[in-house]
Amino acid sequence: MSKQCLAKNRSGKRCGAWAVTGKAKCSLHSDPGRAAQMGAKRGSTLVFPSHSETVSVEPPKPAGEVRDVLANAMSQVQSRNMDVRIANSLAYLSTSLLRAIEVADLERRLVVLESERALAIESA
């Protein structure tokens, strides 16, 4: 029968993991080197160096430019020149940008229609 690990975590509370079958502790607490090994794996993720000089880039304006930026990011991820997390952030921001472009276009069209309607009313 499975039971909870008897070890305590850093805050002094009982570990919430299930104990390994036939033992009193979970797999991490049963093997003290395992936690260090997993932490070392986490620390070895690819980190891109930050550039000391900042580069100012104009944001893409029409939807076609946003599409091109996303296509470029996809190819860079595939060739392992861009971190997936950066590309994911770029895609998320692009969704908001595309929505803003759409709303701005609708607002522009509405202003034109309202001014045409006002001229039609004045001339009638």
Image (tube, rainbow, N blue to C red):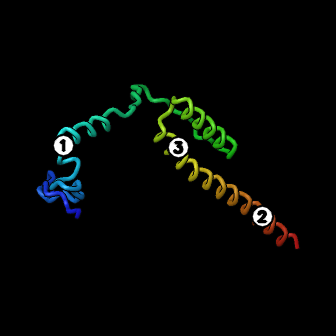
Q: Which mark is residue 90?
A: 3
Measure the C-alpha gap from mark 2 to mark 1.
Answer: 72 Å
Q: Amino acid at mark 3?
A: Leu
Residue assigned mark 2: 113
Element type at mark 1: loop
Name the residue rendered at 22%, 59% in the picture.
Answer: 16
Image quadrant holding the N terminus, namely bottom left
Element type at mark 3: helix
Front one among 113 and 12: 12
Q: Amino acid at mark 2?
A: Leu
Measure the C-alpha gap from mark 3 to mark 2.
Answer: 34 Å
Measure the C-alpha gap from mark 3 to mark 1.
Answer: 40 Å
110 w.r.t. 69: above or below: below
Quarter of image, res 123 = bottom right
Residue that protrudes farthest toward the right in the picture: 124
Q: Is residue 69 left or right of residue 36?
A: right
Q: Which mark is residue 109?
A: none
x, y (%) of residue 109?
74, 59
x, y (%) of residue 124?
88, 74
x, y (%) of residue 98?
62, 51
x, y (%) of residue 52?
39, 25
Label 2 packing within 10 angstroms: few (<14), some (14-19), many (20+): few
Quarter of image, res 73 = top right
Name the residue rendered at 15%, 55% in the picture.
Answer: 24
Residue assigned mark 1: 31
Label 3 packing within 10 angstroms: few (<14), some (14-19), many (20+): some
Q: Is residue 105 left or right of residue 86?
A: right
Q: Amino acid at mark 1?
A: Asp
